[in-house]
Amino acid sequence: MHHGIVAELASKTAEHGSTFLGEDFVGWRTALIVAIPAAVIYELTMALTRKMSLRLPFLILKLARFGTPKEEWEYQSQEWKAELWNILGDRERHWFLRFIDGMTFAIPLAVGGARLSAKASVKAGLKPRDAKGPKHAARHAARRRPTTTIAARAGVASGVLGMVAAGAASQQQASTVTAPSLMWWAVGILGALIIVLMIVGTFWLGVRNFSRSWRPSNREK
Amino acid sequence: MDFNLTPAVVRLLQAFLEDPEAPHFGAELIKKAHVSSGSLYPALRRFEGAGWVTGETEDIDPSEAGRPARRYYTLTPLGAREAHLALAELSQRVRPPATSPGWSAGPVAEGI
């Protein structure tokens, strides 16, 4: 048996040169080639995860918009976003802990805290526009940008137009029984995909807008 | 006072009264008073409405500071007095009655 192993190693050495830990040069070279992209992919994935996870609390906070009156939302959300920004921007803490803190802050507001806060504000007679002074009102007015609305409208329009155009095309080619139904399936999937992309894009643009909105260079635009 | 003294409101008032003149921001109050953001902000709006606290936006240049301006809340003299009275009144209300068996010299549980 022992002689058998020696004979096997000897044959490998003869075939591919010297071996290390049972692998020859080709094996180690392959491992190295795979390891470099794997490390790069790992780092990119982690960076993306960090970036995305630190944006998620903002998306959750945006959900608080539903059920909150517009004027109250515009007044109060600035404060919440500033707090969230500060929570997530604390570089001394690990990103995952910041993410947990951010979610802990955003979720209670999204599930009803924002609505209650708006209700309490209205009941207490606080004036949203005057609460932060005319300076804030002017800044806020300058900060409004309709990119999310444009993205949403463009997405819906693309989806609907795509469906209509492909539907019309399928009617012209209605000579066979199966082709139109297949076409409708394809159009339906395409439309749904565009609408999903629109929703994701809207959220993404919303987050991007917020991150840029407080920069003075953008306020004057 | 047109609001209830819920446990969250009580803890919040205690946090304010620990240092009545210091301004506090939202995340700080959340940690200090152990309340959620969903309880904090409605309570702060009620306090503001009642004149117990005042809110001021931080006076910083966001581009220089590298972060957006926070909103700070400070207890007013009226708020400090009213909050103190409200908590004192509450502690009177929640005090066990004199007839409670806990006051008599009965058997005491170990470790107390």
Image (spheres, grey):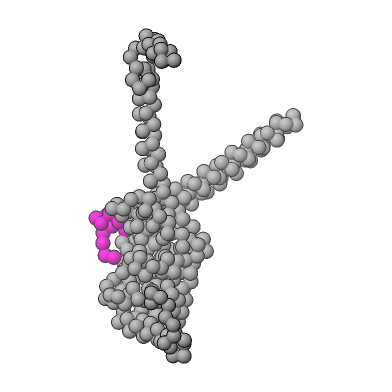
Which of the 4 quarters of the picture holds residue B53?
bottom left
Q: Compared to A12, does A214 lie above or below?
A: below
* Residue B67 part of the magenta segment: yes
Instruction: Identify the residue at horizontal 39%, vertical 26% (top origin).
Output: A34
What percent of the width, then of the height, locates residue A56?
A: 43, 51
Residue at position x 40%, y 84% from top? B91
Residue lying farthest left? Answer: B64
Q: Quadrant of residue A31?
A: top left
Q: Residue at x 46, y 79 (%)?
A: B4
Where residue B99 appears, x then y in whole percent? 46, 90
Residue at 39% in and 80% down: B50
Q: Quadrant of the C terminus of chain B?
A: bottom left
Q: How many numbered discs sit on the rendered protein? A: 0
Q: Is residue B70 visible?
A: yes
Query: Magenta region: which residues?
Result: B58-68
Placement of B108 over or under A169, stated as above or below: below
Foreground residue among A22 and A127 = A22
Question: Magenta includes A156?
Answer: no
Query: Is A125 left, or right, of B27 in this rendering?
Result: right
- Image position of A61 with respect to A24: above or below: below
Residue A126 in view, yes or no:
no
Look at the magenta stretch and give its main secondary structure: loop
User: x%, y% of residue A137?
Assistant: 36, 65
Instruction: Locate residue B7, reporting x and y percent.
Output: 43, 75
